[in-house]
Amino acid sequence: MRSKKWGRYVLVAALIMCLIPVCIASALEVRNGDSVYVPAGDIKGPLFVTGNNITVDANVSGDVFVAGQSVVINGLVAGDVIAAVNTASINGSVKGDVRVACNTLNLYGPVEGSVTGAGNTMYLKDKANIGRDVVIFGNTVEILGAVAGEVMGAANQMYLNAPIVGDVTIWDVQNLVVGPSGTIGGKVTYTSSNKAQISPDAKTGEIEQLTPKPSPVPEMKTKYFSWFGTFGQFAAGLLIWGAAYLLFPNMLSSLGRVGREAPWASIGIGFLAAVAVPVAALLLMITMIGMPLSFILMSAYFAVLILAKVIAGDAIGRLMAERFNWNVRGYQFLGFAVALLALILLSKILIFGFGFFVSLIAVCFAFGVIIMSFYRWRKGKQVPLSQPETALE
């Protein structure tokens, strides 16, 4: 997401990019809103759902893509489940893979494929039998269901109390506990300064403990380059925002308004776009005619990645100006500068991948507000961006 290159018309290119995801989404099963309920029945997937509170009782004959605050999946999913939410509870069976980025995961149903997850608390319950491998990262991880493949990952606290056919490889763990029902058919390799607690009733293969080795990087050099890079990224963001504010002031205002009115919907739709655009670009590359369009699409895609924190920072700055009644232009710039600096600093927190999730949310938000702004303009809910900003009120 870091880059020192930027152009004057990158926002216009981003709007062109939005045509593809909108067309793709129109041919799929899409549900969105604050509280979304998909009733019992059969649905031909893929199913795309965004919202605050989501419940899916239907059986989906395809993949399920979910983004929002909370999701509960009770039905049978014949494909994969891909989710970016705060809390995910998967009670139904999943024929494919489960890939989640969330704060809390509660996996109750069986999964015939693999499970890949990252978050704070990750619970694989006793009936969550996994047909293949588990790759999981979190603060607290509990695996109580049988795993037919290997288990890999990292955690602060990891508890294994289930049959695991393959090897267990934990790259970084503070406390590793193998419970009485733990039966590990392969080798257990873990990196920790603490010895693993293994129940006398547990059955394991060879156990190897590796000692963490700190990187021998000089402290002064690390600090210098870290702060220099942060300052450079902040200065580049200010320059990009200033140029966009002078050249396309109404465009920034439009994007910020959409972000303030529908933040969760923007993040959800942006997540879907972040997934769909690379797939669409790959499909376009199959034909000679589609190769130039694929190149333009991916160029605009990377442009949005570069501008994500600027777009998100502008929306947050405008929200601050609106809440605190800052009607002076200087305060608008101050609000953006504070928001941009906060996003940059938060994205550099590496503990449990916190910085990655901050950057991911910013990217999804940027994609979402661009797509929703373009969609509203096409539907006549918003006047063209070239008209004076006062006409938008």
Image: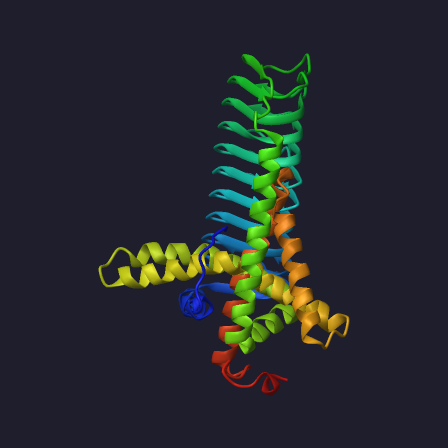
Q: Residue at x 28, y 62 (%)?
A: 292
How many labels, in total? 0
Extreme bottom residue here? 391
Quadrant in the rendering for residue 391: bottom right
293 left or right of 241 in image: left
State whether residue 143 appears in this view: no
Scheme by which the image is coloured: rainbow
Quadrant for the C terminus, please. Answer: bottom right
Q: Residue at x 54, y 58 (%)?
A: 236
Which is more toward the observer, 68 or 165? Answer: 68
Extreme right residue here? 324
Quadrant in the rendering for residue 154: top right
Q: Position of residue 162 (x, y in %)?
A: 61, 25
Q: Position of residue 149 (x, y in %)?
A: 48, 28
Q: Residue at x 53, y 28 (%)?
A: 151
State whether residue 126 appears in this view: yes
Q: Position of residue 260 (x, y in %)?
A: 65, 69
**Looking at the image, residue 183 lies above or below residue 313:** above
Q: Position of residue 2 (x, y in %)?
A: 50, 50
**Looking at the image, residue 381 lies above or below residue 366:** below
326 left or right of 391 in image: right
Quadrant in the rendering for residue 140: top right
